[in-house]
Each structure stands twice: as structure tokens, then as C-alpha cells.
Image (cartoon, coloured by chain):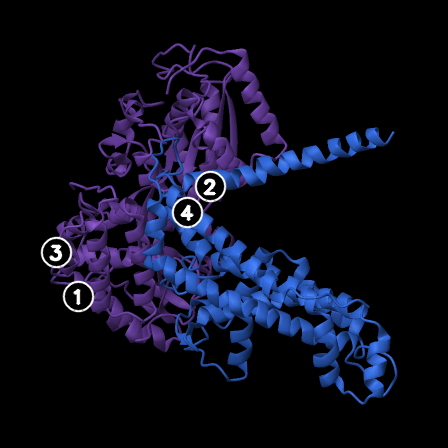
Chain colours: A blue, B purple
Amino acid sequence: MRHGVARFVTGFLALPVALYLFYVVWPFAQAAGYSLTDWGGYSDRQEFVGLDNYVRLLSDELIRKAFWHNVFFLVTVPLFTIALALFLAFLLNVGGREDRAGVRGVFGSGLYKVIFFFPQVLSLVVVAVMWQQIYRSDSQGLINGVLMKIGLVDPDNPIAFTADPEPFLGVPAVLWWLLLIAVWSGAGFYMVLFSAAMQSIPRDIYEAALLDGAGPFHTFFRITLPLLRDTVSVAWVYLGFIALDMYALVFVMTPSQGGPNHASEIFASVLNFTAFQKGQFGYACAMGVALAIFTILLAALQLRITRRERIEF
Amino acid sequence: MSVTPENAADLSRRSLLRRAAAAGLLVTPAAGLLSACAGSEPSKSDEAGGTKSKDNPFGIKDGSAVKVVIFNGGLGDQWAKEDKAVFNAKHPNVTVNMSSTQKIKTEEQPKMATQPSDLIMNSGADIMDISTLVNEGAIEPLDDLLTAPAWDGEGTVADTLLPGTVADGTFQGKFFVVNVAFTVWGNWYNGALFAKEGWEPPKTFDEFFALAPKIKAKGIAPYVHDAVHGYYPRWALMATIWKSAGKQAVVDIDNLKENAWKADGILPALQAWEKLVKDKLLLPGNLNHTQSQQAWLDGRAAFIQVGTWLKNEMAATIPPGFEMKLSDYWGLGATDKAPKDVFAGAGEGLVVPSKAPNKAAAKELIRAILSKSGSAKFAELTKSLASTKGSGDGVQDSALATANELMKNAPKDLIKTKFWDFYADLDKESQNLSEELMAGRLTAQGFVDKMQAAADKIAKDPSVKKQTRDA
């Protein structure tokens, strides 16, 4: 009988594993294979070129620029998203009236939760198209239109948003505007995630803190945040992946997909250009493999740094 | 491509793939890469068996099917459906499976090495790079199509085409791309508005700069352009360069000749554009193509430069009483070497993949598209000229009429730039720099210097296959 169950379970698992190997792992392996060739992408003619593509990668100016833009997102997207999500989650779950025993959120927190979570329901391309209208750089754009009406923006000199390459704090303005969208669309999900984690923290701990006279500031930094460490760490890794991608936003929002004049170029946009415009699939595969290795290293490093003893409660 | 006899194993593989595709599994890019590995096997061909005749010069087989993908952009896809009817009138037993999309490359590229469609209209922003297709041997030379008899007229197919069409589709000495639309580019204006105000459409930048203050006085921006896709402003910049510096200067640019961008007449042409930006004659804001075109239709700007697909693209939102008229690009005046040359040429290219299973029917379908009845329908439905002679003769439309007029007065030489088809890197760089110049962040001198540097880089790169044009 037990033997029969094992066979049944194995049978069930074999198909998904096979599909996974065939459609996920095998294409990855193929991409690694192609990265050692000069394949053009439209035919079956290809020649083995060894590590040439990787050597070329190291001296590619555009890739270097794209790499630093990715690093910018890698630092800022998780930082701002998690900070905002934590702040919102804290307000909605424990930031309520402090004079009463017990833990509660601010008034109307249920409604806020729905509103903040809403962007998560939209696909990223829908988000991007919506923000195109918000960012539109004439009087018909949402932000420019309002600011022009109240006289804060000169109609002859509207805010250019994603068409603006001028540096702000050393980083092209277009990247900051893209960052705003990424944080806006991501924060709601992590707010819900952190809310769930906060609700699993026993009330006694908060009550004890309250009796000891802790205000919201101390409650947050001494109790909530340390007990959320695992969740934040997972969120950080996950947001890291998103930050390394950013492709949909760059593709839809920026002029010439990575512009103006390469100011918003990221790994994925250079990869796309190299594969599909230049017809150098071999080289593009090398970029993909390099990005994959970088991502895996980063995730490993991140989990290693944040690993520590679990707190049981 | 070799033609293998039908055998059971081959057939089952094909039907298996088809079923998988139906399940939606093959559309993932990963699976596309995956199926590419099977590309070395010769695919089955439906070509064998048809008898060749004057009415059927490629010998297409009765009962076969042909898969066609049409780019559904500014020209729509209704014209293609009409051509399908033209085709089926002669070949009722050949099934034409026609679909249309805006995502040509995304959908077709993964299939190119194994199971491509038979006929692809390679066009739009998501276009498969032509020089890569040619270099990779991924598309079929169509020289036999040119020598085939015309569908419903005298002579060969080549005889029915407008000048420039064969040259536009020829790469490395062979004819690969059948461009079906004949596009004329220039500066568009509202004829009704200009008549009311008594304005004359300018022929040179000086005339434009003289008119601009009058336009501004009416609260209208003199000029608007697409500031998101760099190839839009680039057409205008290259047209002025050609008019000012002459044809040879642009031929030298395309051929990566040393210091080609430093030739006489190029810098002044770009300086005219620099002045247009500096003098704040542009509508503020970074609009894309449809936004800028709508701003122009809404009367917020007087001039916009774009090709003859404009009318069809904006058909739904043209205000009543608006009279779309096309005027030639502006030159610099007395110093111009080719002031009367018009920017026009064949575009919207049809290609037949080398691995297409039914190439005969694909070619026959092109013959139908290039027929007299097909191209007349094309002009009528798209408000754009077809690349066959006389396609626009029966059409009453002010936009098309002014385009026709422009073509009638045009000299033999048409403005034509090739470097952006030849080299993807130079294409990208020139688009970016055109945007920068029009955004006022780059001077004319800076544009020339940076383009020269980019061209030199391509010229020195041994990994880039060089191409040249003679004329």
C-alpha cells in the first residue's frame, strides 16, 4: 500500500520536473552554450568562439554604463520600497493609539490596505502605460497639467520626466523617475507581506513594551523590526531580482528604449538591442549568462549576511 | 533548401509541433530558442508537385496552404485582406492563413530557423533587422519574382514597379525585400488654416524663419515633432543634409568614407535645425508620434514632418475642415546642391523566409499584391501610394494629391539614406543624437563630431560586415 502511494506521488512529480527541466533548465543551458558562439539568431549557422564574447563584455562601454544603472536600482529599489512598505505596515498595524493596551492600526487601516495594495493587481506594462500619461510632458500630462494650472511650472518649459538625462545627485533624472514608479508599484505588496508578519508577533510583547513606556519609535526599532528580520531579508532578495530586471519600465517609458542617449540603459535593454537589433545572439547570451551569475551571487551573499539564529515565539 | 520526400516520421514531428503550438506552449521565447536547435533538419516543403505556367509561374500546388503575417500599423491590414481575395480569385484551392500583428520580431524571429511563416511583412518599430536577415541567409532572394510576368498587366513584375523599389529591396546584389508602400516624406500643414491666414508654405529655412513669428503671434507653435522615437527627427535632418550638401555627401556618409560628416553643407544644414530649437519654435513637451500628430491636428502646431501614412494613421481623429497638405522638406536656399530632391521611397517590406514551407505560394501572393487591382485598392484604403505605377491615379484625396504633385515635380534622384539599414550601432547613435539635437542639448557641431566618431568606430571594427551603395 505504502509502496503504491510512493509510486503515485513520484508519477505526479515526474511530469512537472520534466517540464521544468525541458522549458526552464534546458533553455538556460542552451543560452550558456550559445554564449560561446557567434550565432546571429535568425539561422542555424554558428561558430564556436570560446570565451571571446565574455572578454568583449568586459571592455564594452555601454555594458559598463548599464551595469552601474542596474547597481543604482539594486541599491535604491529595495531600500525605498522596504522602507516605505515597513512604514505603511507599521502605521496600519501597530501605529494606532498608544494610550490603550493592545495593538491596533490607525483609523481606517483596512481601506488603506486595499488602496496601497492596488498597484500590485496591475501588470507592470499597464502601470507603465498609466504613468506615461501621468508623466506626459505637456499640459495634457497629469503632473505637468496640474502644476501649470497653479503656476508652478512654466508651460514653455515643462518637466521632461523620463526624457530628462540631466543628472540629479549624480544619477540621470530619468532613473529617479523610473525608480518612483518601481517603488510605487512594489510597496503595496510588501506592505501586505510585512503586515502579515507583524500580526504574527505576539501582543504580549507590545503590551510589555507599552507598560515600560515605549513610544511608537522605540516599539518599531526595538521590537517590530528585529522580529521582522527574516521577512525583510526575503523581501530584499526578491526586490533585488526586480531591480536587476526593470526591463518593462525602461522599454515602455524611455525614449529609444534606454534613452535619451543611453541615459537609462540597463543590462536587459542592452541585451535586447544586441540580440534583436544587432543580430548578435551569441554575445547577447553571454550578457544574459553574466547577469544570471551576478544575480545568483548576489542572492547567495544576501542570504549569507542576513542568516542568524531564529527567534521562536 | 533541400526538398525531402514526405515520410511518416517527418510528418509526425510536424503535427506534434503544430499541436504543441496550438496549446500555446511554443510561443514562449524559451521554447523558441529551444526549437531553434532542431533547425538543422530540413523542413518539409509543399512546393513539390505544382505545374508551372504563365498563370502560375512558381508552380504552386493546388490544395496547399500559405501562412501570411501582416504588420498592422499606420496602414492597417484591410488592404491585405483585399489582396487575399485577388489571390483566391485565381487560386481558389490555396488556403491563405492571414494574421496581423504589431509585434513582428517578437512573434516571427523565434520561428525563423525552423518553422517560419511563408510571407512576412517586416515593418514597424518591432522590425527584424534586414542586414542580419540577409547576412544570416534567413530570407530568400526574390529575383525570379522580378522576371515573372505581371499579374494583370503587360511585361514583368519589375516593369510595374515605381523607380527605386527594386533598389530599395536589393542587398548585396540580390533582391530580397518587396516594399509594397511608396512613401513620400515632407512637412505637413493644414491647407485650410494657411489659406485663411494667407500664409505660404515655406520652401527654405529662411522663409520658415520669416513666417514663424506670424504663426507664433496666433498662439500656435511653428513646429512639432516626435521626440520619443529618434528616427522621426532623423528623417528631417538627413533630408536637409541631402538638399544642402548634395547626394554625394550622403552616399559618402553611407559608405563610411573618411570625414564624410565634415563635407561642405552638412554643418550649415544642421545649424538651421539648431536655430529652430534655439529660437523656441518647437511645441514644448516630449511627445511621441501619435501625441505630436494629434497636437498638430488640434491646431497647437503649424508644421509636422512625417510620411504619407500620416492620414491613415490619424484617420479617426482628423477634425472637420482640416485640410492635410504635404510640402517638401526645407532646404537652405541659394547654396543648396540638390534643392528639389524629394524624400521618398518604397517601404513596408515583404520578405519570404528561406525556411518557409510554401515559398511558391508566398511569391505568387506577392505577385497578387503588386497587381493593378491590388495596388489600386491599397492606395484607396491606405491613402498612401503603392510601389506599383499608377496606383494613386483613381484616388481623390488632398493628402495623396499633394504627395502625387510633389512626386511629379521631383527629379530622378530621390533622397535616400542607407547607413541606418547597414549598421545597427550607427542607427542607434544617429537616433539618439537626433533627439539630443532637437532637445537642445547638442549643437550642430557636436552632432557632426559625434556622428563622425561613431562612423569611424564602425569603419575600424573588423567584426562588422561592411556594405556600400553605388548610387
Tell me the crowding category of disc 1: few under 14, some 14 to 19, or many 20 or more residues within 10 angstroms, Cα based.
some
Q: CA distance from mark 3 to mark 2?
A: 51 Å
Q: Which residue is nearer to you in this view: B412 or B227?
A: B227
Please, is residue B359 above or below residue A108 in the view?
above
Whether labels 3 and 2 belong to a single chain: the reply is no
Please, is residue A14 above or below residue B76 in the view?
above
Q: CA distance from mark 4 to mark 1?
A: 43 Å
Q: Which residue is nearer to you in this view: B165 or B45?
A: B45
Mark 2 / mark 4, whichever is N-terminal = 2
Place of residue B261 in the rendered image (x, y in percent of width and height, measured from the top left) = 17, 58
* Residue hosting label 3: B337
Place of residue A117 in the rendered image (x, y in percent of width and height, measured from the top left) = 70, 65
* Residue hosting label 2: A31
Hey, what amino acid is under mark 4? Ala
Q: CA distance from mark 1 to mark 2?
A: 48 Å
Place of residue B9 in the rendered image (x, y in percent of width and height, measured from the top left) = 54, 14
* Residue hosting label 4: A286
Hey, what amino acid is under mark 2? Ala
Q: CA distance from mark 1 to mark 3?
A: 13 Å
Please, is residue A176 above or below residue B383 in the view?
below
User: In the drawing, does residue A307 fall left or right of residue B367?
Assistant: right
Residue B87: tell me if it is visible.
yes
Q: Which chain's residue wears label 3?
A: B
Q: Which chain's residue wears label 1?
A: B
Mark 1 vs mark 2: give the one in front. 2
User: In the drawing, does residue B446 fall left or right of residue B353?
Assistant: left
